[in-house]
Image: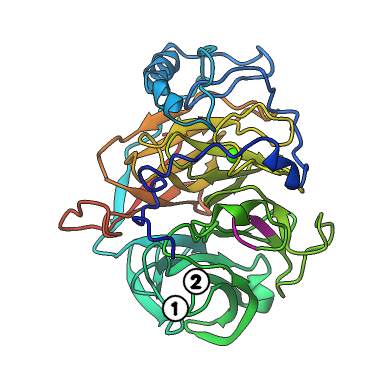
């Protein structure tokens, strides 16, 4: 497709975007909104976000980490579309460190998505084998099905999995995979095996890179999907394309009630989103791969325009919503994300670590804290289990890692010991 080197960590080297002219941008919809949790004009440092209030307490350790993270900021100056966030403004919400991860199971191949069944077992996708696995809370693995229609290639394959919030009644399980001609979302009935496959949404553009792929049910009971722009950056701003979007739909794949554009699009202007998580107040956050300067965590608003390809990182452009957290692409390249115990937990591929991003009750986002750096390699899947622990999947066999003999693994982590 694009002829560029596939990398889901960041964009191809040298793709450092020609700065799209601001006047050309006038052709794009001007839907950007400024969320009340992000204050334009307040500088941010990579891995940090500014609190709106001074109510929270800050830890010295976090300040040190913030300063350390800030050291990589000059990378931003290489790219015209990114702005270097200003000096660090202190800080992170003071929280005790998590426990130590425990290996739940090993010898998997790129476990991409994890979703829990009632009862505590998980369904786990493997991207490149297109297998759907069932993993018990004690780590026993069994194969549920192989998705023959999936066409794993590059960054595509079997990716997202979601379990219906009404599973006890309807038995529905949803998968997002790359097929021969597109990315699609398929609904199945699950009872130890998959039956009654029904394509509920197709026509999501596919590419060798940037296929998005995350599925998750929101607290509103609707199914959300994260897509990528397939390397064709123009698609992100087009409301006629499902690429580079966050989608919101019913269990039948229809636009969910209240959607902003009379279709399944919920937000746009995204490059490649692979993480979706809600806090207890129902705020939706999404992690997004930057190209060569800044990765992002965004607070997602209905109808919001998140700026790609005009802006990467904090743009301060009123047409676009700025991220609430940024990282340089070498310290993050964020994929799976979950909320647990007062924080967002973000898996980093290239950054080979887990980022903890404190979120206060009022939505104030604290400075991100890196955990387990270079200990487990690339991290792809992060999901909160029914018991409150985190399940974390490595991605060392995805063609860009250095797999250990027992990779890939699923780890469990207790957020607060
Ligand atoms: Ca953005």
Quarter of the image where one finds residue 1: bottom left
On the question of residue 416 being in view, the answer is: no
Quadrant of res 5: bottom left
Q: How is the image coloured?
A: rainbow
The answer to which image quadrant residue 144 occupies is bottom left
Mark 1 and mark 2 in contact? Answer it, CB < 8 Å. Answer: yes
Residue placed furthest toward the bottom: 196
The answer to which of 178 and 374 lies nearer the viewer is 178
- Callout 2 secondary element: strand
Q: Residue 49 placed where, x, y %?
A: 57, 24
Task: Determine the residue positioned at 33% across, 70% down.
Answer: 141
Tell which of 194 and 12 is nearer to you. Answer: 12
Residue 315 in the image: state x and y as whole percent. Answer: 61, 29
Residue 97 image offset from top left, x and y in percent: 40, 28
Q: Main secondary structure of the magenta part?
A: loop
* Residue 47 vertical placement versus 13 (above, below): above
Q: How many marks?
A: 2
Instruction: Identify the mark nearer the N-term, 1 or 2.
Output: 1
Tell me where the magenta segment starts and ends, as one range: 242-247
Q: Tell me the residue that label 1 is attached to.
A: 150
In the figure, is residue 73 to the left or right of 48?
left
Displayed-image quarter of ligand 1: top right
Q: Which residue is mark 2?
A: 177
């Amino acid at each position: 497709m694009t002829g560029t080197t596939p990398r889901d960590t960041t964009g191809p080297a040298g793709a450092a975007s020609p700065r799209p002219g601001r006047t050309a941008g006038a052709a794009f919809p001007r839907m950007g909104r400024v969320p009340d949790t992000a204050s334009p004009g307040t500088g941010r440092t990579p891995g940090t976000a500014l609190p709106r209030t001074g109510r929270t307490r800050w830890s010295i350790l976090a300040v040190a980490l913030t300063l350390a993270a800030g050291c990589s900021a000059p990378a931003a100056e290489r790219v015209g579309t990114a702005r270097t966030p200003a000096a660090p403004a202190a800080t992170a919400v003071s929280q005790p460190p998590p426990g130590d991860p425990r290996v739940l199971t090993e010898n998997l191949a790129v476990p991409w998505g994890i979703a829990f069944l009632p009862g505590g077992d998980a369904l786990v996708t493997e991207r490149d084998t297109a297998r759907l696995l069932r993993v018990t809370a004690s780590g026993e693995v069994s194969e549920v099905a192989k998705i023959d229609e999936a066409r794993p290639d590059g960054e595509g394959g079997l990716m997202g999995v979601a379990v219906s919030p009404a599973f006890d009644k309807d038995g529905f399980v949803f998968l997002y995979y790359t097929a021969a001609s597109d990315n699609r979302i398929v609904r199945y009935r699950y009872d130890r095996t998959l039956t009654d496959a029904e394509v509920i949404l197709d026509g999501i553009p596919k590419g060798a890179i940037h296929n998005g792929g995350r599925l998750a049910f929101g607290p509103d009971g609707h199914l959300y999907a994260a897509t990528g722009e397939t390397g064709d950056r123009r698609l992100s701003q087009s409301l006629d394309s499902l690429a580079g979007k966050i989608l919101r739909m019913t269990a039948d794949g229809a636009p969910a009630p209240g959607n902003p554009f009379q279709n399944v699009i919920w937000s746009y202007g995204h490059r490649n989103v692979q993480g979706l998580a809600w806090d207890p107040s129902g705020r939706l956050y999404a992690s997004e791969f930057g190209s060569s300067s800044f990765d992002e965590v965004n607070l997602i608003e209905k109808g919001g325009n998140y700026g790609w390809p005009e802006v990467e990182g904090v743009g301060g452009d009123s047409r676009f919503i700025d991220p609430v957290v940024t990282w340089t692409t070498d310290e993050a390249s964020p994929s799976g994300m979950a909320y647990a115990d007062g924080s967002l937990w973000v898996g980093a591929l290239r950054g080979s670590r887990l980022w903890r991003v404190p979120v206060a009750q009022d939505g104030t986002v604290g400075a991100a804290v890196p955990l387990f750096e270079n200990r487990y390699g690339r991290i792809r899947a992060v999901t909160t289990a029914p018991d409150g622990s985190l399940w974390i999947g490595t991605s060392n066999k995805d063609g860009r890692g250095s797999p250990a003999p027992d990779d890939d693994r699923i780890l469990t982590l207790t957020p607060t010991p």
